Structures are given as structure tokens and as C-alpha cells.
Image (cartoon, grey):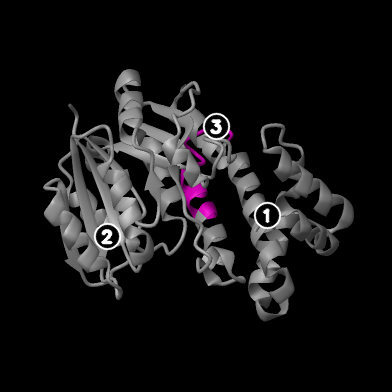
Amino acid sequence: MSKVSIIIPVYDTEKYLAECLDSVLRQSHRALEIIIINDGSPDNSKQIINEYAKKDKRIIAINQKNTGVSKARNRGIAMASGEYVVFVDSDDVIHEDFIKNLLSDVVDYGADIVTAAVGRDHTMLNRKVEDLPRIQMTPEQTLMALYRGKLEGTRNGVQMFSLKLLCDNDLRYDESMAIGEDFDLLARAVLASKKVVVDRRRMYFYRQNDDSAMLQGFNSKHFEAIKNVERVGRQMEGEVEGLRQAVDVMMFSDAIFYGAKIFPERKEWPKEWRVIKRIVRENRRQALFDSEAKLNTRIKALIVTVFGVIIGFMMIRRLIRW
């Protein structure tokens, strides 16, 4: 059986870590290498990891000073010996057939990457995985769907990568990025791949952390997210026909979301607010008339086009599910 390396960076998640590790150890595909990197957690995560390492010889426990999630994942890639690599966040959980099904997708279709949807309903862990068709895509098709937010039904889901793909193309997480590093790696990996499979079955379950910066008031990370989308997309737009327009629409979508978040505090972030307004104004018509854009994106573009940016943001704030 093909060995899969599961890389789990851990930082300050003792409350959920055992549940995460239990779900990994329950995998029906048994040929696993489980690399757990305790990234300087100030809580009891180290003790929990060490206890699990004693129970299962497939676990490789690494304890290090805090370096950030991207560096921790990159260390995991350097250590990995499996044919394929999957990244799991230490407060999330996976269905018992998650690895088996993704590995089947990769092998059956001869793909370099399989990307799957994520869910939030943890009760689905105990249910049979729904039967949904898998979709083969070229790298060009995948990038277009990724930048239109239509790849797996979620922003960029969760992936199984060929380790050979990552190593042969020197693909690593950008350690300078504080947000959007998953999206960045996926986009670059897709461009280097030959075939991608999209699996829209929900087998990976995200835990919404109320302390997450993404759920709090506007901060500098949110503004960085918009800039990162533009930077990564602009670097690739010459490689794929039509990608420039898709990047424009994603910038509009992100600016609308973060603009709605910053709106009550816009006087505290004058520079960022001006840039967000400019992005919305410059790209709203592109988003409105792009027949391939998501419907809710086009609706928001219509709102700010008809009612203007200020009133538009006031209306859109009521539509967003925070």
C-alpha cells in the first residue's frame, strides 16, 4: 500500500488535540507516517503528543521553538517519506475513510493533487461518506476554478499532494506570509502539476475557533490577505488565458468581504479603507458581468454599482454570514 505522510503542526490546541489525533489514528488506510510538530506550544500539547507517540509507532513527534505554521509544515515536508502528503490542522478532525478515499482518487486518476471540500458538521464523522462524482481537471482549469472560488465549493479546501511534485519543483509554504499561505502553495502546485482531481465529498471537518483573527474585528492580516491574492495571481496570470480577469474578480470578492468587516472601524484604518474602496470600484464591473463568477459575488457587485460603495457596504454587511 502507498504510504501517506500526515503532517500536523500544533500550537496551543490542547483542548482539541486528542480528538484530532484520534481521528487520524482511526484511518482505515493504515500505511501512515504521522509527523506531529509541536511548534513551541505554551499549553500541555507536548505532553499529549508524547503520550500518543508511545501508543502508536507511526507517530513521529517533534518538539521545537515557535517558528510559525508555515515553517513547521515545511519541516514536515523535509521529513516526509510517504509517496503522498496531507496537512491536518491540530484542532480539526477527519473521517475514517479520508485518507483512503483521497489516495484512491490520486491513484485511480493518475493525478498529482487531489483537492477536497471541507465541512463544519462534525456529526458527519460517524456517517457513511456521500457518493459524489470526482472531477478531473487540467492545471489551467483548476487555477481558473480556484480563483473563481468554485473549485470544491469552498475557498481552497484540503489537499493530498504527491511528495515528488513538491520536492521536484521545490514547492514549500511561503514563510513570509501570515495569511493565505495554503492558497499560495496550492496555486503554485497546481501550475506545476499535470492533472488535478476535485473531490467534493466532505471528509475533513474544520473547527471554527472563536478566537481566530479572521472572526475578530479588522486587523492587518485581513489587508494582507487581499495583497497576497493579488501578488500570487499576478505572478501566474501570464501562464493561463483568462486568469487575469479571474484574479480581478477574486480581489473584488475579498475586498468586499474585508471592506464589510472594516466598515465600522474605517476611520481607524484610513489607508487600508482607501485601498479597499479603490479595489471595489475598479473591479465591480468585471465581477458584475463575469458570467463565470459566483452568483453571490455578482449580486454584491450589483449592489455597490447601483447604490454606491458606502451604502453598498452597509447593505452587504447584513448579507454576510460572519
User: Please, is residue 294 above or below residue 227 in the view?
Assistant: above
Mark 3 near mark 1, Cβ–Cβ under 8 Å? no
Secondary structure of residue under mark 1: loop
> Which amino acid type is marked by label 1?
Arg
Please rate how many residues cluster around mark 2, counting C-alpha atoms within 10 Å: few if below 14, some from 14 to 19, many from 20. Answer: many
Residue 26 rendering spot, x and y as whole percentages? 28, 40
Mark 3–mark 1 distance (CA, rounded to whole Å): 33 Å
Mark 3–mark 2 distance (CA, rounded to whole Å): 35 Å
Q: Earlier in the sequence, mark 1 or mark 2?
A: 2
Q: Nearer the viewer, mark 3 or mark 2?
A: 2
Residue in the picture at 50% in, 66% down: 212
- Is residue 111 found left or right of 296 in the rendered image? left
Mark 1–mark 2 distance (CA, rounded to whole Å): 31 Å
Residue bearing mark 1: 321
Residue in the picture at 49% in, 62% down: 209
Residue bearing mark 3: 241
Residue bearing mark 2: 72
Secondary structure of residue under mark 3: loop
